[in-house]
Amino acid sequence: MMMNSKNLSLAFKENINSQGMLKIANYLKELGKKSMKYFLTSNPLLAKEQILNPSNEFVNNLQKDIPERANALFICSDPNSYDLTDKFAEEMKTCFFNSGFKFKNFKVLDNRNAKEKSELISEAEVVILAGGHVPTQNIFFQQINLKNELKTANKIIIGFSAGSMNCSEEVYAQPELQGESLDPNYKRFLKGLGITKSQILPHYNLIKNEYLDGKRLFEEITYPDSFGRSFITLNDGCYLYGDGQYEIVYGESFIISDGTIKK
C-alpha cells in the first residue's frame, strides 16, 4: 500500500498523541518491511522445450519481481537423493536461463551442505522449492528449520508441486504412493512453512481420474479429507501468486471443500 506525505503526517500525529515515539518507531519499522512474494506452481516447466511455461503470464510476472543477476537457491525434496536433485536443479536452471533469467549464482541445498543452510538461504534472492514426495520434503524443511529461516526474509519463493504444497500453514499431504491411503500411521496433515494458508493440490489435469489403493484418488480419498477445509486444485501451467497482502490464482482452478468440488 502506498502512502502520501499527508497520510504519513496524520499517522505521525495520531501515534504521537497516543503512545509516543516508541509507536512511531514501530510504525516506521512495519512500513519499511518488504513482503515476501511467492509463485506456487503445479509445474512451471515445459521440459521438452527446456523453457519456463509462459502460460497465464507466469514468465512476465516473474520478470517483474526477480532482479537481474539474482542469487538463486534450489532446495531439494529428498535430501539424500543427490543425483536426482542435481538432475532436477540443472533442468530448472536451464529452463530459467532459456527464458531470459541470468542468475549470478544457482546453488543447491540438500544434506551435502545442510550445515551451511543459513548462509545459503540468506544470500539467495530467489528460493526454488523442488517437487517430489510431500512428507519427505516436509521432514527436511523441518530439519533445516526453513520456516524460521524464511520468517523475516524478503525473497521470491517459487514452489514446484510438493514445494508449493509444503508452503501452506497446514499442508494436505494427499496420499500418493501405494499403501499410503490405507496406512493408519500416514499423516495427511502436516505443519508447513506458513507462507500461505491456501492448501494446494497440483497436477489436477493429470491425476484427477487416477486410482490409488483401489480407490478413486479424489472422489474416495481427497473429497472425504476436505470436510472443514478447502483445497485449491491447480492444473499444470497454473499458479498461486501472493505478496503478503493478497493472493490470486492464475489459470483454471477448482475448490474442493466439504466433500464437493466447484469453480
Image (cartoon, rainbow, N blue to C red):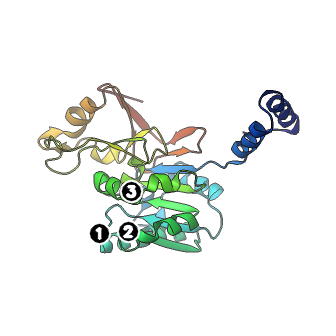
Q: Quadrant of residue 9?
A: top right
- Can you give x and y, in whole percent of width and height, for residue 169 in the image? 43, 41
Which quadrant would the C terminus be assigned to in this image? top left
Question: Would you say 241 lies left or right of 177 here?
Answer: right
Q: Is residue 96 visible?
A: no
Q: From the viewer's perspective, tell me whether residue 11 is left or right of residue 164.
A: right
| Distance (Cα) linking label 3 and label 1 | 13 Å
The residue nearer to you, when weighing 59 against 9, is 9
Name which residue lies at 58% across and 55% down.
153
Q: Which residue is mark 3?
A: 141
Pointer 1 local density, CA inside 10 Å: few below 14, some 14–19, many at least 20: few
> Which tag, 2 or 1, sits closer to the chain's start?
1
Query: Are the two marked residues, 2 and 1, in contact with CB atoms closer than 8 angstroms?
Result: yes
**Dot 2 corresponds to which residue?**
110
Q: Label 1 amino acid?
A: Asn
**Residue 35 or 21: which is nearer the viewer?**
21
